[in-house]
Image (tube, rainbow, N blue to C red):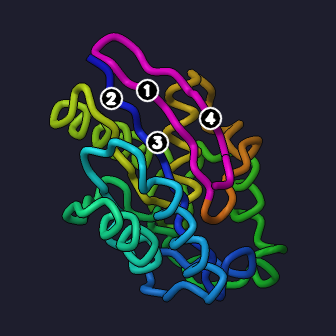
Amino acid sequence: MMTTFHLVRHGTYPLVDRALGGRADHTLSPAGQHQAERLAEGFAAARIAAVVTSPVRRAVDTAAPIAARLRLDLQRDAAFTEIAFGAWEGRSFTELHDDAAWQAWNQFRSTAPSPGEPMLAVQARAVAGLWDWHVRHPEGAVVIVSHADIIKAVLCHVLGSPLDLMQRLEIGAGSVSEIVLNDRDARVRAVNRQP
């Protein structure tokens, strides 16, 4: 019994690559809306059992067209929500550039944002979420719309790679990564694929 997970990063929004959007409810930009529609078209012919999303608005707005196209209810799951960045949330990358703790966290994700959610805890909740959806759909395919760091943490888990190396993975806005999970192991099939 094997579940295929299509891990989708939410579409572009005004702060992407400029600031830490965190858990704030930012809407998609017009380009992000286009990405969401393109993703929906890409999944239109697929046999998908469930569409699951982080409860953060930019993820929900990306997932909604996919669920609508597939005529499935959209499922919100906090296991896939954005990392809690603590005091860094909402700050621009320019502001954070000279922050020693920020630099350390970007180099070593095994450290925690100050005071935020440790990456190991993020990885644990996301992987637990995958197992939960695997149990619900042991022979199906599930689309999960989430955030770059969540997807990177899941991929590191599947690959057996330390979290400190997760910045070597690139997960672009509107991209799809794919893993398969069975009761014994998991495998990566694709990373950062643009539909």
What is the C-alpha distance between the residues marked 3 and 2?
A: 24 Å
> Label 3: how many residues lie within 10 Å, few (<14), some (14-19) or many (20+)?
some
Residue count near mark 1 (Cα–Cα under 10 Å), binned few <14, some 14–19, many ≥20: some
Q: Spatial distance from mark 4 to mark 3, Cα to Cα?
A: 23 Å
Instruction: State the residue at coordinates (59%, 42%).
Output: 110
Find out whether the residues at labels 4 and 1 contact each other: C-beta distance under 8 Å.
no
Q: Earlier in the sequence, mark 3 or mark 1?
A: 3
Up the image or down, 15 lies above or below 144; here it is below
Which label sits on residue 180? 1
In space, the residues marked 4 and 1 are separated at their CA atoms by 10 Å
Q: Are marks 1 and 2 in contact (CB under 8 Å)?
A: yes
Q: Which of these two is toward me, 42 or 143?
A: 42
SS class of the residue under badge 2? Answer: strand
Q: Residue furthest top?
A: 184
Task: Find disc 4 in the rendering and name its residue.
Answer: 190
Type of the residue with mark 1: Val
